Amino acid sequence: MNYIIKELRRHLGRTIASISGYIIATIFIMLILSVTGTDKESSTGILKGTGTHFIVYIPSNISCCVSCDNESNKGSLFAEGVNTIMLTSDVIDSIKKINGVKDAAPYLLYKHYEPEFNADISLGGIELNSIATKNNVCAATNIISGKFLSDNKDDVVAEESFALAHNISVGDTLKIYGSNILISGIVNSGIKPGKADLYSSIDNVRTILKDNLKCISPGFDMNIVLVEVTDARKQNEVLLQLKERMKYLSVSSYNCFEPASEVMIIKEKTSALISILIFLFLVIFSARTQLTSLIERYREIGILKSLGWSNHKLGRQILAISLIQAVIGVTLGILSGFVIIFLMNTFNIRVFNLLEFQFQISSIPLLFGLSFAGGLLAGVFPIIKLYRTRAGEMINNFM
Amino acid sequence: MNDYQIECISLSKQYISKNQKIIALNDVNIRFSQNEIVLLKGRSGSGKSTLLNIMCGLIKPTAGKVIIDNICITELKDDSLSRLLSERIGIIFQSFNLLPVYTVYENIEMGLIPQGLKPGEVKDNIMSLLEQFDLINKAHLLPAELSAGQQQKVAIIRTLAKEPSIIFADEPTGSVDDETAGEILEHLLNMKREKNLTLFIATHGNIPDKIADKVFIIENGRVNGT
């Protein structure tokens, strides 16, 4: 060990050059990891939330609830254009138990012919503050004017397309469903499987169905279950489990999860490939540094061999020097990289004005692991050369 | 078993240089006994350094073998050869071959590390040798700060400190002035007498034959001896 420290100190220029190489390589790798990490984090975050929702219902050939007051004024609970039967909250509990399900929420979707509009007008009863509702029906983020549904049970919001078609504005009162309904907001929920013309809280819709329309139905818990899964890649697995456990349910999904899942897999493979390439770069760089160092020390090593130093002893020292340089270099590289990333973030420097440099704490063990592996591999090539060369050749080639 | 300490049997060395086959040694057969002084004389390029390097195991011959103390060193594995080099064989080079970044003291110490000696154990021995060679006040200097003669003395001390039974010296006086050459030769002969060493010296001719028990002449890779 004494000799190793002396060797590092006496060849200070070479030691500094080797360590500097590791520092530069580490900073380079850290910056790449920090950018790819941010890219992966943001894109995966977006993709994970893409196509993670679907609705579940039981189709039926009959309308399950009929207004008692007016036989011609028939309405029905429906989903995806077909009549449905009612579901109980047990279904939600069962769905929530499926591995990969993040959230499940009840939804009551009713349509009713209104002569004044000369059209079927659909009313969706939603559970507020549910991620499954947000992604399958609508949420406060979809509001474009007025205010979204609140704890006030009587609030109703209209879908923008419906409002435009019937010239409805915020504050208008509609005489439908046997009562006066005040429009508190307009939403544009986009393409969602549970889209309706009007939305209100599920409790309000239950009241309208039972009290205003005098519909006859057992329960009115819900006719649709809105489901959100944890990750687009899990959706297929959840759908399979659901079909297996509750064969009678019909599932409707836009299948966005398939391309999202594919893109995520591609991105993960790309990230893995980049990591492998970075690792190879580090190993080749380290091996080259150590080999250059050996060539510079070639004659000295030959002299030591002629003094009786064994290949084993010299090999161990080359390896130890290689590892020490790698560890010092990577440690200093991490510190320098941290400072650079900190400064870049302080001065708001972004790649293509988009990607942020984010210090990846998880990369520290990886970098040390890589440096250790790199140091070992880098030491192996010079050691092979050492074993294959006689002392005389090492001395005389440089005499 | 035989009476010879060192035997070279049918040694040949060929190598390729600039696409040409060079015969450095051609069927060399020499032998000598323990405690002898042997001179190998020849002009530059005659093959004497090649022969010396093969005899002490630093390079491999193309054919033939070298036997030292009944051990065929040309067939030895690296570890055994290292042990032999650290315990029994000392080599003195014409170009000194000191380690440039280590001090005089450390250079000498480097030769003793393979024997497993701890720094404290060897200090007295090293200082005593430095005193004998009048280099005691140079112990802390780097080789580059010494004259050629002083560097060669350090190389000799490094070899002697190991207490080998055989010393191979390749032109030990070749890089120094006549006065220093005489001094170095005297040191070597004194040490040889004190320690009962076998001394094999390769020279181009500036060492008198009279000091030797045997003289071999090498010319174009072939050896003739007396």
Image: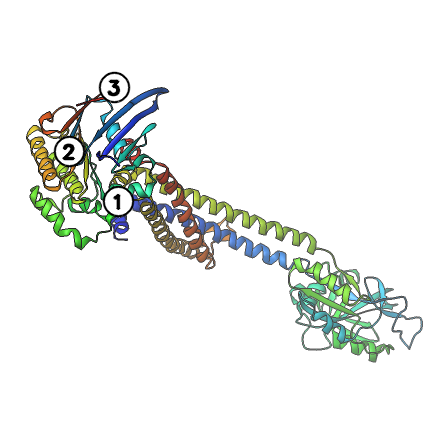
Q: Nearer the viewer, residue B28 or A108?
A: B28
Q: Amino acid at mark 2?
A: Glu
Label 3 to label 1, Cα distance in Å? 41 Å
Report the residue at 22% width, 35% height from top: B5
Disc 1 residue crowd, few under 14, some 14–19, many 20+, Cα 10 Å? some
Q: Position of residue A252 (x, y in %)?
A: 77, 61
Position above or below: A357 against B95: below
Label 2 element class = loop
User: Is residue A280 visible in this depiction of the protein?
Assistant: yes
Quickly name the residue at label 1.
A11
Q: x, y (%) of residue A273?
A: 54, 47
Mark seen at residue B220: 3
The residue drawn where x is 30% and y is 44% is A310
Kind of element beneath mark 3: loop
* Residue A313 vertical placement versus A100 (above, below): above
Tell me where residue A157 sits by quadrant: bottom right
Q: Give the distance between the C-alpha atoms of the residues marked 2 and 3, in whole angstroms.
A: 25 Å
Q: Are marks 2 and 1 on the same chain?
A: no
Q: Amino acid at mark 3?
A: Asn
Is there a contact, CB below 8 Å, between mark 2 and mark 1? no
Quarter of image, res A399: top left
